[in-house]
Structures are given as C-alpha cells and as structure tokens.
Amino acid sequence: MVETTISVIKADIGSLAGHVIVPDFILEFARKEMKEAAEKKIINDFYVTHAGDDLELIMTHFKGEDNEEIHKLAWDTFMKCAEMGREHKIYAAGQDLLSDTFSGNVKGMGPGSAEMTITERKSEPIAIFMADKTDPGAFNYPLFRIFADPFNTAGLVIDPNLHGGFSFVIQDIKKEIPCFIEMKCPAEMYDVLALLGSTSRYTIKKVYRNDGMITASVSTDKLHMVAGKYVGKDDPVAIVRAHSGLPAMGEVLEAFTLPHLVAGWMRGSHVGPLMPVAIKDSRCTRFDGPPRVIGLGFQVCNGSLVGPVDLFEDVAFDITRQRAMEIADYLRRIGPFEPGHRLEEASMEYTTLPRVLDKCAARFSEEEIVPEDKSKDTSGSAE
C-alpha cells in the first residue's frame, strides 16, 4: 500500500505593518508555486495559509519525510516570496531564511517543518496546528493532555483501542547535535512530565500509539541555535491524527481550552497566553500578540486534502479567548519583572537584552559601593 506523507513547512518571510500578517500578494504567489508543483507531480496536493506573520505550506506527497525535492520546493518558494517582500519593503522580509544556499533540507536553515508518513486508514481525519509568537515547547502542554491525560481525553479510559497508551519522542533542543528519548505513557508518565515541564529545553518531536502507529509530529527547530542570536520566534507547527483508535477530534481540541502560558510575545522576551483563534483573527497586534494558534481540520484521501475546517472558528472557544485576554492584561501589568511578564535570564540569552546588560557589566565592583553623603549641612549654621 502506498504511504502518504504530510509535510507542513513554514517560515516568516516578511509581513505587513510589523510582525502582523502575511500580505495577500505573497499568499497568492505561494499558491501559484504550489499549484505548478502539483501539476509537475512534485506534490500531490497542497493548502497555503498563514499563522500571523508566518507563511504556512501544507503539502501531501508520496516521497517520504526529509525529501530533498519537497524541501527545495518549500525553500525556493520562501526565497521568491522574500524577494517579493523586499521589493514591496514589507517588514522583516526573509527573516527566517538564514542562508542563501539550499543544502538538501530546510532543517537548520531557518524554516520550521513537521512531517508525518502514514498508511491511510478507512477514514483519515487530521488536525494541523500552527502557532505564532512562541517557541516549540508551546505544544508540550496540549499534546500531553491529548495523549496522556484521561481528564482531557476520556477515550484513554473508555476506549479499548486507546487503553494501551502512547509513547512520546522528546528532543533536548539545547543540544547542538539533536538528542532524543522515547518514553511511554502511562508507565513513565511522571518522567515524561519531569521533562516536558521544562518547555524551553525539552519538546515533543513525535507521538506514537504504543503499538507503533504514528499519531503526531511537531517542528522543533530553534532559530537562535542556528543564527547564534535572536532573529525571531520559532512559531511551531504540529500534525495530529484523530479518531479510529486515536483521540477524537473533540478531545484533541479540548486540550486548547486552557490558554496556557508560553514563551515569546514581543521580541521573544515575554510570557503570554496561547490563544486559539480562527484564521481571520490570526494577526498579532497587541504587544505583538498575544501568542496565537490556529487549527485546520482535513480529511486525507488517497494523498489529497479534503477541507479544511477552521477548527477554532467556533463560539465554544470564546470563553477561552476571553480568559486569554484577561491573562494578557494581568501579565502586561507586571512589566519587566520575573517570573511574570519577562522570561527568566537563561531564556533571554539570545534576545536583545544581553546588548543592554553588556553596557552595565564594566560598572560592577567587587566591593560594595557607598555613595557620598551630600545630605549633611557642612556650613555649621543651624536653622
């Protein structure tokens, strides 16, 4: 049986009026490039959209993961779109493109990618989640809830097909050479939480049902690990399969009803709530945020995409959005103080803050400094 590969590759190649939204002319150009690639049989099907200021290419094909032809298609599309952006002087054109030369794969070159190769079931519903103004650890919380938390996913208790649990492939993204560990739930649940709670270091790369079926894939690319400095947030994407022996789509979406705190927001330097929104509301304006996530639902049919459904375009998520804005208000009032609004020092290492702190470094003394007391009256006169 032919296996279908789903590839979601994204990049911030520039946006309108700051880090807000991908211009329509770039979206249309990307669709034209994808259509031509489909006509040439490079890909089988596609969908182009945006998550805030990130251009998102969703592609299906039969070439497997990490395929050079697929990744070059995405890279060339991003490069052409960035050049169009520069011609129109859009903001931060080509921001995520950290090289001028393609080297066989977009990994380590700036764009993020999540891929999954599946043997299609009788019915194959999937959700694709795309975040903006945050980092790869943003999906740790919802994916753990989807695949390991029975208070979120009732099927873990009542569906015998889920009762065997799921395995998490976790990546240490602080390592220069990628390092991975596989841990099974429910048997190793506490160990999984010990890692995934450190969202700035350990991120979920893939999730498998404990019989080996692939169920989720996440981009874990860290821009500052490649560039050596802050050049923008990583803005991860994730692919999640649903139903027929996996969590139902309703259980998948339930994990996003709490706007949990993530790193990112303005200049990648702050903590903010991850707010699920419809595509029409996927434009980050308030303090360059708050961080957002969109979700598109598709049916995969013989390598083609049927859909999408805009999963968060539903009044059922209004209360989540309201709660997110209340959290955003609270955090903004804390200002530049840890641990509330501003990230801890270790996470600020690759932001713009070190350039400010460097100016202060030479003024530190090993001895306590006592300012001269000029408050005393030295004239000898009395009032």
Image (spheres, rainbow, N blue to C red):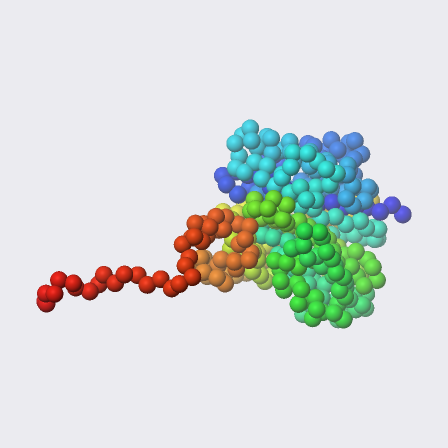
Q: Position of residue 247 (x, y in %)?
A: 74, 61
Depth check: give the residue in front, 152 or 223.
Answer: 223
Q: Residue furthest right?
A: 1
**Residue drawn at the location 25% of the way across and 63% of the way down:** 373
Depth check: give the residue in front, 218 or 309.
Answer: 218
- Would you say residue 315 is visible in this rendering? no
Q: Position of residue 12 (x, y in %)?
A: 60, 41
* Number of numbered discs visible in the structure rendering: 0
In the rendered view of the protein, which quadrant contains the C terminus? bottom left
Depth check: give the residue in front, 260 or 345.
Answer: 345
**Residue drawn at the location 42% of the way across and 57% of the way down:** 364
Give the quadrant of residue 75.
top right
Relative to residue 173, is residue 69 drawn left or right? right
**Residue drawn at the location 52% of the way across and 37% of the way down:** 91
- Would you say residue 230 is visible in this rendering? yes
Q: Position of residue 193 (x, y in %)?
A: 67, 67
Relative to residue 10, is residue 338 drawn left or right? left
**Residue drawn at the location 70% of the way across and 66% of the way down:** 192
Q: Position of residue 195 (x, y in %)?
A: 67, 64
Q: Residue furthest front?
A: 367
Give the quadrant of residue 320.
bottom right
Relative to residue 83, is residue 340 drawn left or right? left
Depth check: give the residue in front, 377 or 155.
Answer: 377
